């Protein structure tokens, strides 16, 4: 392979920020209300309206939202919670930290989301809940999973951290009556630096989450130091909410840019010899979070990634299986062979640079570099 070293690295992700974010942040700075202020309230109203939920509770991260949902549900030692092995570790950490035991169910080979049949097969008398995942912004099989959970008396939580703007059966993810979370890390569709939100249709759940995120304080007329339950500091800031409002104002445009960039990659990669992300269908409309391709079996992924980086193209494994992480192996004894479909996908997938503002020329450069990296 020719040694081509680029002067400028194409990053894996980059938020799309502008003057409107600066304007709203400056307003908050001048107001003096940096936390627990009206900007957070306004963001929550706008986000809930956007996804079709009754309430939104803003938090310091999507992980915090998952944790509070598990804390509120009372998961603990002796309980089992089923989730996907092909996801970010937070999908399991949120209940493991409460003492519950993770049970990993196999994924569908096309969508890489939980296979409902595998979920049902994994249910035991100790099962308390299912944490579904909308991996890479592709909606999970929400209705079959909800039916299974209702039939077995289980709690269902939707980890939609990567799926803001996605639609399932014609309605936004987050607007189906199932508690869901979104994340706002800089590589997400809506970026505020850090942050997340829980959406719910339950007023009781909303009030409990508002208390839990603020050290268990009472919101029923109690004093500031009236802590009626064990809580945590998962508060967000009005500065971040200001960025979030500006991002919401242009979310449709950013989602469209991401979709256009994904379509462009699809065209450029047509004859490169890699597997492409699952296409939308009548029930599933992806919100493009990352662009992940699957290498052919037997390809030396580490060599491909090293060659891409030498040419100034950022890349990453997307995504390691949770049950094979070192701490999961050590604590629970998980090993290879538990979820072969997820494990094979995890071993062959990698992410290409992808974000709303990516230039067409940069996408061509990425694909040209990938083609060379796959060569002899």
Image (cartoon, grey):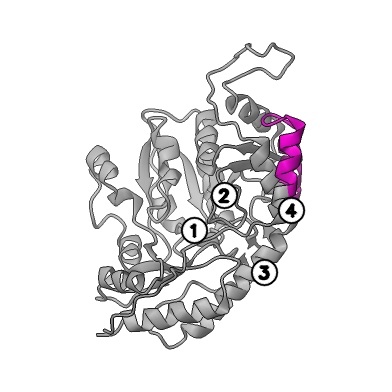
Discs 1, 2 touching: Cβ within 8 Å: no
Residue 49 on the magenta span? yes
Which quadrant does the N terminus fall into? bottom left
**Does the residue at mark 4 contact the one at mark 2 (Cβ under 8 Å)?**
no
* Numbered marks: total: 4
Mark closer to the chain start, 4 or 2: 4
Q: In this rendering, which labeled residue sits more in front, label 4 or label 2?
A: 4
Point out the tag, 3 or 2, that comes first from the N-terminus.
2
Q: Residues within 10 Å of mark 4 (few under 14, many from 20)?
A: some
Give the residue number, with chain letter if any, for mark 3. Answer: 256
The circle on residue 146 is 2
Q: Quadrant of residue 54?
A: top right
Give the CA separation, mark 4 to mark 3. Answer: 19 Å
- Tag nearer the camera, 3 or 2: 3
In this view, 121 is above or below 278:
above
Which residues are the magenta region?
23-50
- At numbered mark 3, what does the secondary structure look like: helix, strand or loop? helix
Which residue in the structure is indicated by mark 1? Answer: 135
Please name which of the two marks, 4 or 3, marks the residue nearer to the observer.
4
Marks 4 and 2, Cα distance to the nearest angstrom? 39 Å
Q: CA distance from mark 3 to mark 2?
A: 30 Å
Q: Residue 369 in the image: x percent, y percent?
A: 39, 80
> Residue, x 38% and y 79% (percent of image)?
370
> Gap between marks 1 and 2, in whole Å?
17 Å
Mark whose residue sits in front, 1 or 2: 1
* Closer to viewer: mark 1 or mark 3: 3
Give whichever of discs 4 and 3 has the lower sequence position: 4
- Kindly identify the residue that appears in the image at 39 percent across and 66 percent down: 315
């Amino acid at each position: 392979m020719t040694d081509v070293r680029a002067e400028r690295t194409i990053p894996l992700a980059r938020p799309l920020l502008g003057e409107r974010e600066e304007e709203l942040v400056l307003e908050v700075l001048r107001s003096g209300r940096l936390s627990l202020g009206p900007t957070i309230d306004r963001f929550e109203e706008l986000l809930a309206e956007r996804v079709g939920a009754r309430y939104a509770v803003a938090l310091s991260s999507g992980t915090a939202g998952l944790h509070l949902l598990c804390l509120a549900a009372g998961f603990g030692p002796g309980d089992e919670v089923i989730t996907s092995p092909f996801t970010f570790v937070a999908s399991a950490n949120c209940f493991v930290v409460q003492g519950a035991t993770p049970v990993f169910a196999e994924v569908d080979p096309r969508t890489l989301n939980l296979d409902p049949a595998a979920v049902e097969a994994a249910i035991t008398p100790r099962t308390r809940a299912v944490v579904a995942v909308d991996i890479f912004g592709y909606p999970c099989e929400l209705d079959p999973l909800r039916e299974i959970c209702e039939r077995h008396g289980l709690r269902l939580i939707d980890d939609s951290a990567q799926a803001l703007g996605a639609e399932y059966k014609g309605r936004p993810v987050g607007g189906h009556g199932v508690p869901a979370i979104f994340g706002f890390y800089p590589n997400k569709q809506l970026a505020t630096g850090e942050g997340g939100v829980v959406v719910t249709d339950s007023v009781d759940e909303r009030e409990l989450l508002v208390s839990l995120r603020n050290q268990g304080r009472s919101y029923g007329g109690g004093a500031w130091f009236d802590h009626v339950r064990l809580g945590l500091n998962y508060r967000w800031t009005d500065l971040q909410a200001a960025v979030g409002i500006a991002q919401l104002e242009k979310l449709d445009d950013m989602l469209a840019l991401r979709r256009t960039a994904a379509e462009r990659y699809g065209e450029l990669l047509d004859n490169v010899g890699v597997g492409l992300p699952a296409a939308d269908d009548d029930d599933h409309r992806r919100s493009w979070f990352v662009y992940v391709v699957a290498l052919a079996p037997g390809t030396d992924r580490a060599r491909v990634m090293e060659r891409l980086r030498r040419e100034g193209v950022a890349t990453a494994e997307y995504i390691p299986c949770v049950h094979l992480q070192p701490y999961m192996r050590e604590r629970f004894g998980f090993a290879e062979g538990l979820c072969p479909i997820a494990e094979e996908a995890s071993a062959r997938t990698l992410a290409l640079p992808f974000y709303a503002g990516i230039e067409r020329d940069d996408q061509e450069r990425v694909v040209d570099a990938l083609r060379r990296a796959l060569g002899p």
